[in-house]
Image (tube, rainbow, N blue to C red):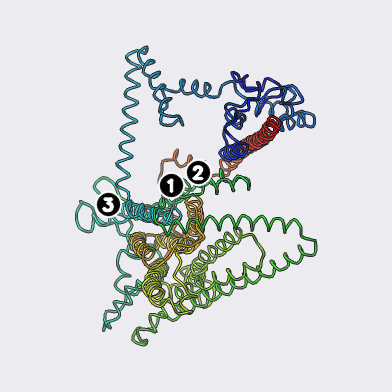
Amino acid sequence: MSEPGASALPPGRPSRHGSVHQGVQQGPEETARTAACDVCRGRSVQDGLFSAVPENLSLDSSSFSSPPVNFLQELPSYRSVARRRTTIPARDKQSGALLKPTDSYSSHVEGGIAENLSSQSLRKYALNISEKRRLRDIQETQMKYLSEWDQWKRYSSKSWKRFLEKAREMTTHLELWRDDIRSIEGKFGTGIQSYFSFLRFLVLLNMVIFLIIFTLVLLPILLTKYKITNSTFVLIPFKDTDIQCTLYPISSSGLIYFYSYIIDLLSGTGFLEETSLFYGHYTIDGVKFQNFTYDLPLAYLLSTIAYLALSLLWIVKRSVEGFKINLIRSEEHFQSYCNKIFAGWDFCITNRSTADLKHSSLRYELRADLEEERIRQKIAGRTSEETIRIYSLRLFLNCIVLAVLAACFYAIYIATIFSQEHMKKEIDKMVFGENLLILYLPSIVITLANFITPMIFARIIHYEDYSPGFEIRLTILRCVFMRMATICVLVFTLGSKITSCDNGPCELCGYNQKLYPCWETQVGQEMYKLMIFDFIIILAVTLFVDFPRKLLVTYCSSWKLIQCWGQQEFAIPDNVLGIVYGQTICWIGAFFSPLLPAIATLKFIIIFYVKELSLLYTCRPSPRQFRASNSNFFFLLVLLIGLCLAIIPLTISMTRIPSSKACGPFTNYNTTWAVIPTTVSTFPSSLQSLVHGVTSEAFAVPFFIIICLVMFYFIALAGAHKRVVDQLREQLSLESRDKRYLIQKLTEAQQDLRPS
């Protein structure tokens, strides 16, 4: 932006305001096109204000009716600043500071680089090769005047940085599925590539969760069981508990049907119930080594807290990067249009069909922007009667959505109650299919609900008159809530059955010992069945729906029904919701089934290859594509919602429901969480006082106040940064007005100087 008056002229350019030559090599149309590109690129003030002026064309004061100073005062930026100074004097200093140009932008940058040559690498600066070479010569010259100690520090710092860069390059070659994901990125773009990268992240996350549980819980038991170390098991001491609460009937070992092993493998019952897969297997108090005793109940609880905290920190760390990009891209509509036109192409695409798909995607985004602008104008032009009518319709449709959700939740509740009441029948009284149906009834109802409700929501959203972008977000949000809430409904239904007896409250054991002698194991079996059934559905849909559909579309394309059906689309949101649903099951079930993360890791590995084959041979990419940055942030946000919903039932089960007295490491504790106060009571008195002080209200209230003050500080800092960003955007807008004004004046000057 230009400073008012003649001082706004950049130094060293007085000849730009001389006489106007007739030999012009660049027409006004080309000049306007160059200026428009400069506006969209956001070039600097000194490089942009006079870039519209041709090199061999200068402005003479005689060409205009006023001197150069008055001519500059006609610029829109000067008028805006003058108007602001007369209306809002308090902002005069801020506006002047923002609109004041530097004397030499390049010299300022070079000075800053010269000061930071010792600490920063030249690669981090956006300079051309000649400037980097010149700065490197300056750096070498400066090195000669340093002491030997300083020179050694410089060289050692450079060597260490080079070593770290080489190490990062080597680690990139060790990434899981690196070549496969790059191939997918090259053929289908960064949107679909982000889904497979997200799937790889879940594989690594579950692998780390399994290592945590294995190290803290399984490893000491295996070392003792197989006599690898000189250690022994510490049995749980007998406690004054009613004998009925300690009864845990084992499955009968009589005549076993041939399909019983299949049922046990699919449901987690029978021979799997007695393995280390489930909670009931770990019925010991600890492991006694030579110098210490390993507290298994404490380690079991800490492993659960550790994997939940690790998941939270890892997800937040990865989502912050996507949030920054989304925050930067929250631009105005004109800037969004410029980004789509000049920077919307995905240069990772090498396939012709994918390039055509990207073209159609850009056209779709532009049409969506125009549709959203039409919706905004329509909203602005609504009358009071139309506003009342549309809000009444939305209220009615949202009541329908709530009714659909309530019906699904009630169906899951009824199916869970029916399954739990009938699964205790003797296996010889049922046929194979009936028994399997009873065991998997809640999983079947949940899968049907997750399949039907998205189609209902997609139909309802069309009548609510939202913008296209908001329609997608609201539909996905409803589907996320539906998928996550079904798991919570199942867990809370099991919890209500566990804590209720036939005659009222369970006063003897605190839970329904007759139906659930080891309720943690049975909850783990339900999570295991959900995991296995979800995996079976994914494989079945791919093998028995997608592949036959591809064959029909390929070889029977002349049939009208097949043309209407079309080829299966690889919808990124639906696939993401599916794997987040599976990950939420893993988070909830890992406490009740410690080996479930290993099963989830193997499941996601197989899903990766199945989805890759499905994408390459049976599916086509969806025309409604996602950008990689938006996709990553959306995926992690949905995953974070799933983690928060998984923490709720786990917290309730560990703190509110009494632990089983017949199995597990917490048989001598009223609840799972009771092991923490018991462990703290064994600390020295000074450490106990410290722990009690940190967990008391006297510490919590000041800590909460300090956290609120820090939060308010960062909110105020973010508001100040936002105001600066708004001022810079206004500065760019004023610069574009100045360019258009100069182009207009140049065009008028050229027309006046043409021979008549």
Which residue in the protein does label 1 denote?
680
Q: Secondary structure at mark 3?
A: strand
Is residue 97 shown to the viewer in this render?
Answer: yes
Asked if labels 1 and 2 touch by Cβ distance under 8 angstroms, the answer is yes
Question: Which numbered circle lies on residue 288?
Answer: 3
Q: Amino acid at mark 1?
A: Val
Q: Earlier in the sequence, mark 2 or mark 3?
A: 3
Q: Is residue 537 left or right of residue 76?
A: left
Question: Which numbered circle lies on residue 692?
Answer: 2
Q: Amino acid at mark 2?
A: His
Q: Earlier in the sequence, mark 1 or mark 3?
A: 3
Callout 1 crowding tier (Cα within 10 Å): few <14, some 14–19, many ≥20 = some
Q: Secondary structure at mark 1?
A: helix
Q: Secondary structure at mark 2?
A: helix
x and y percentages locating residue 174 in the rendered image = 29, 47
Task: Tell me the residue at 33%/63% (across/down).
Answer: 606
Task: Tell me the residue at 38%/68% (across/down).
Answer: 618
State the quadrant of the N terminus: top right
x and y percentages locating residue 340 in the rendered image = 55, 49
State the quadrant of the C terminus: top right
- 236, 649: nearer the viewer: 649
